[in-house]
């Protein structure tokens, strides 16, 4: 099975100059816990999680509306392509200890997101079993 068969396409994103309050609003609207950060060409340059917002606000004693997404964009972001095999992407998730990967085109532009939940809900039985194993490894169990 390939990523394009199970990925989520309706993905919100924020720009480098958007604040974390904007990212949180996107998470609320899209019912998700992660928002890719994109540049002017919609290339993925970072990622914001709900955990990132909480820790940034608490550790810096600042409101999310005062913290720009660019402050979280310096970390490397693991991405994948639409044509990749789901089994390969799950291995990369385990290596990066993440549950979701932005799906990007050849130029790095955001096309969607693939998550372990996508694999469990839309994948075949073999990939679903791999997803459970991956989740256990990511969670440290």
Image: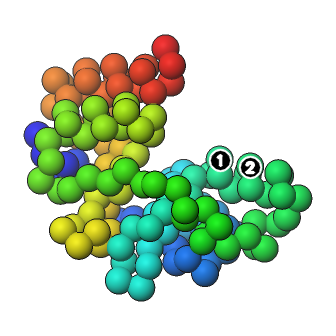
Q: Residue furthest right?
A: 61
Residue drawn 61% across the image and 78% down it: 18
At which x and y percent is residue 87?
Answer: 19, 33
* Mark 2, secondary structure of its residue: helix
Q: Is residue 25 above or below residue 42?
A: above
Q: Residue furthest bottom?
A: 40
Residue drawn 49% across the image and 14% down it: 141
State the separation of the CA atoms marked 1 and 2: 6 Å
Q: What residue is shown with label 2?
A: 55
* Mark 1, secondary structure of its residue: helix
Q: Coloured how? A: rainbow
At which x and y percent is residue 81?
Answer: 20, 56
Q: Residues within 10 Å of mark 2 (few under 14, many from 20)?
A: few
Q: Is residue 57 visible?
A: yes
Is the C-beta separation of discs 1 and 2 under 8 Å? yes
Q: Is residue 117 above or below residue 102?
A: above
At which x and y percent is residue 83?
Answer: 12, 53
- Residue 131 placement: quadrant: top left
Q: Is residue 31 left or right of residue 123?
A: right
Q: Is residue 8 visible?
A: no
Q: What residue is shown with label 1?
A: 51
- Residue 41 placement: quadrant: bottom left
Q: Is residue 106 left or right of residue 102?
A: left
Q: Residues within 10 Å of mark 1 (few under 14, many from 20)?
A: few
Q: Is residue 127 above or below residue 96?
A: above
At which x and y percent is residue 27?
Answer: 56, 60
């Amino acid at each position: 099975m390939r990523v394009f068969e199970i990925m989520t396409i309706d993905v919100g994103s924020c720009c480098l100059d958007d604040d974390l309050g904007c990212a949180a609003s996107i998470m609320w609207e899209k019912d998700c816990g992660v928002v890719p950060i994109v540049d002017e060409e919609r290339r993925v340059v970072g990622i914001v999680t709900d955990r990132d917002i909480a820790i940034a606000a608490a550790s810096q004693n600042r409101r999310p509306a005062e913290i720009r997404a660019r402050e979280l964009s310096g970390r490397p972001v693991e991405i994948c392509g639409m044509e990749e095999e789901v089994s390969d992407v799950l291995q990369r998730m385990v290596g990066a200890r993440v549950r979701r990967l932005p799906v990007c085109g050849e130029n790095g532009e955001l096309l969607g997101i693939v998550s372990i939940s996508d694999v469990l809900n839309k994948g075949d039985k073999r990939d679903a079993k791999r997803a459970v194993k991956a989740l256990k490894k990511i969670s440290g169990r």
